[in-house]
Image (cartoon, rainbow, N blue to C red):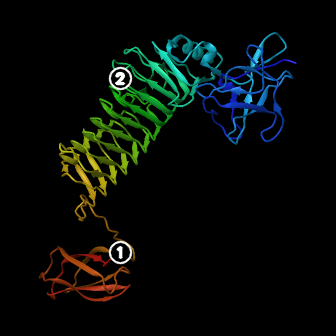
């Protein structure tokens, strides 16, 4: 019976019952069994030179070298590295009986296309060939094993092609051309990049990930997860009209542009919506941390910026929310530039060196809840700046520096223990439990029927329209839960009196 080839590629590791990638320590000895627990060990294996072996030694990255399985047509085995749990290992391919072979899984490895990952070889052509092959097959998952892959040119991505590495510390795509992006694509959709490090040359104009729209309605279904992107001359992540996508635990460091730049033209209804950024960070980026330009219905949660001139900038956005985010050592922590209906909940600026939060360019409907300014830097001037033409509601602001409020700002808890409400207070005025209204005196007296009156209620009275011989109105009598009587010091007073009931807290 035929022996089947195992090892080296992602098709080798299928972790059950828990999904995920399985790796072992460098040089670990791995044995193979016919059952997940106990069972019989396969000892009649062969290396690729045909020598008999009973176990396989992991390489320097914890991956398995290629080897041949048992001779009795075994297409899958349970691998045991002594860690207390076995994983299902699948052969690369199974003969079809027609002279060809079919893959067991639809995962491909870049090493199957000649990529070395040795830190010296230019792997651009090999990685591009793997992407093209995955695309030609209708969309596949591409495994990039641990190693440093030198890229002297950009990798042009394709729709439906996913890439998974061995982790941001282990799988490194190293761009060397300062004018090229690392991973780029136009009008693509349904792409996942996970467990990778994209490292740039430290200068130039290239970005780590750059996806642009040309003719498609939007760029949709993009997932970036567990990525480290660093040292590019341009943006860490630039996406044009990104929609229905998620960025999860993406860390951008020391890029010459913005950490995360999501752009959507403001004169079109296409794209730029329904995207989430969760647990993403931008550190030491020259232009700023997060720049959302024209995005709509997008959420940032548990994101952070450090050491950038601009922490977060919402430029002409609609319905964008920041929840539990922060900016440290930034000149401006958050700028809301125009747009409508953007909300911020639980936002902290620390060691800001200018303005913590700036509302400008007629930003409307901004809600700031739980914004805190902590230990502003020596150059800090303002906590909250609201320019003329902006409209905002602020709840629970903790300010160290003064506020500059030229716009329309409704504040609850201005930070000094006071209550500040700009606008109108509306009190119900109708039905049996009315708390305010008007009454017309007749011969200096009138009875007001309302169940809202209590024994300890305070009733405020004002003359609305003088009539007759005007006197001073006062509450003469009350029946709790039924009515109270207004009486004037003038028996011929026929004025219209306004009344309002206040109850002690």
Image position, residue 50 (x, y; %): 78, 14
Count of numbered labels shown in the rendering: 2
* Depth order, front residue of 107/429: 107
Query: Quarter of the image holding residue 163?
Result: top right
Mark 1 vs mark 2, foreground winner is 2
Q: According to the image, label 1 marks what residue?
A: 434
Q: Residue at x 24, y 58 (%)?
A: 422
Please tell me the numbered disc located at residue 101: none
Q: Is residue 464 left or right of residue 427?
A: left
The answer to whether 178 is drawn above or below residue 277 in the figure is: above
Q: Residue at x 61, y 13 (%)?
A: 113
Q: Is residue 469 left or right of residue 194?
A: left
Image position, residue 353 (x, y; %): 22, 42
Query: Quarter of the image holding residue 76?
Result: top right
Of the residues under marks 1 and 2, which one precedes in the sequence? 2
Q: Residue at x 26, y 80 (%)?
A: 459
Image position, residue 307 (x, y; %): 30, 37
Query: Quarter of the image holding residue 67?
Result: top right
Q: According to the image, label 2 marks what residue?
A: 234
Is any part of residue 218 visible from this angle?
Answer: no
* Depth order, front residue of 297/34: 34
Is any part of residue 187 visible from this angle?
Answer: yes
Marks 1 and 2, Cα distance to the nearest angstrom?
A: 63 Å
Q: Is residue 41 left or right of residue 139?
A: right
Task: Tell me the element at label 2.
Answer: loop
The answer to whether 280 is drawn above or below residue 161 in the figure is: below
């Amino acid at each position: 019976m035929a022996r089947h080839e195992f090892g080296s590629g992602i098709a080798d590791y299928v972790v059950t019952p828990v999904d995920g990638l399985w790796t072992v320590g460098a040089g670990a000895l791995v044995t193979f069994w016919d059952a997940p627990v106990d069972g019989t060990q396969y000892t009649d294996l062969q290396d690729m030179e045909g020598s008999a072996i009973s176990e396989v030694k992991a390489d320097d990255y914890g991956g398995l070298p290629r080897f041949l399985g048992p001779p009795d047509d075994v297409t899958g085995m349970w691998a045991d590295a002594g860690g207390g749990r076995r994983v299902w290992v699948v052969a690369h391919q199974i003969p079809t009986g027609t002279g060809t072979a079919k893959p067991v899984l639809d995962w491909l490895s870049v090493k199957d296309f000649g990529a070395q990952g040795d830190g010296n070889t230019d792997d651009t052509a090999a990685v591009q060939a793997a992407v093209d092959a995955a695309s030609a097959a209708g969309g596949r998952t591409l495994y990039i094993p641990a190693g440093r892959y030198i890229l002297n040119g950009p990798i042009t991505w394709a729709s439906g092609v996913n890439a998974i590495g061995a982790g941001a510390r282990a799988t490194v795509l190293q761009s060397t051309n300062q004018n090229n992006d690392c991973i780029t694509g136009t009008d693509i959709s349904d792409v996942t990049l996970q467990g990778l490090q994209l490292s740039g040359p430290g200068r130039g104009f290239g970005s780590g990930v750059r996806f642009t729209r040309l003719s498609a309605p939007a760029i949709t279904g993009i997932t970036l997860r567990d990525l480290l992107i660093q040292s590019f001359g341009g943006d860490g992540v630039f996406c044009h009209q990104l929609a229905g996508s998620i960025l999860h635990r993406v860390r951008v460091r020391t890029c010459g542009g913005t950490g995360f730049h999501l752009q959507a033209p403001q004169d079109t209804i296409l794209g730029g919506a329904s995207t989430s950024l969760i647990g993403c960070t931008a550190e030491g980026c020259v232009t700023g941390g997060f720049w959302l330009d024209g995005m709509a219905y997008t959420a940032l949660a548990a994101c952070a910026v450090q050491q950038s001139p601009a922490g977060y900038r919402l430029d002409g956005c609609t319905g964008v929310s920041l929840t539990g985010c922060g900016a440290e050592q930034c000149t401006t922590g958050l700028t809301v530039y125009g747009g409508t209906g953007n909300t911020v909940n639980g936002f902290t600026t620390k060691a800001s060196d200018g303005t913590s939060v700036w509302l400008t360019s007629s930003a409307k409907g901004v809600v700031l809840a739980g914004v805190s300014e902590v230990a502003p830097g020596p150059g800090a001037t303002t906590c909250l700046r609201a320019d003329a033409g902006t409209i905002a509601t602020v709840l629970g602001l903790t300010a160290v520096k003064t506020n500059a409020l030229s716009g329309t700002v409704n504040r609850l808890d201005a930070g000094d223990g006071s209550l500040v409400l700009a606008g109108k207070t509306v009190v119900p005025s109708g039905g049996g439990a009315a708390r305010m209204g008007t009454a017309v005196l007749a011969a200096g007296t009138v009875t007001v029927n309302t169940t809202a009156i209590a024994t300890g209620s305070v009733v405020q009275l004002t003359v609305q329209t003088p009539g007759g011989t005007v006197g001073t109105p006062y509450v003469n009598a009350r029946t709790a839960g039924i009515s109270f009587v207004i009486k004037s010091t003038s028996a011929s007073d026929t004025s219209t009196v306004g009344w309002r009931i206040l109850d002690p807290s």
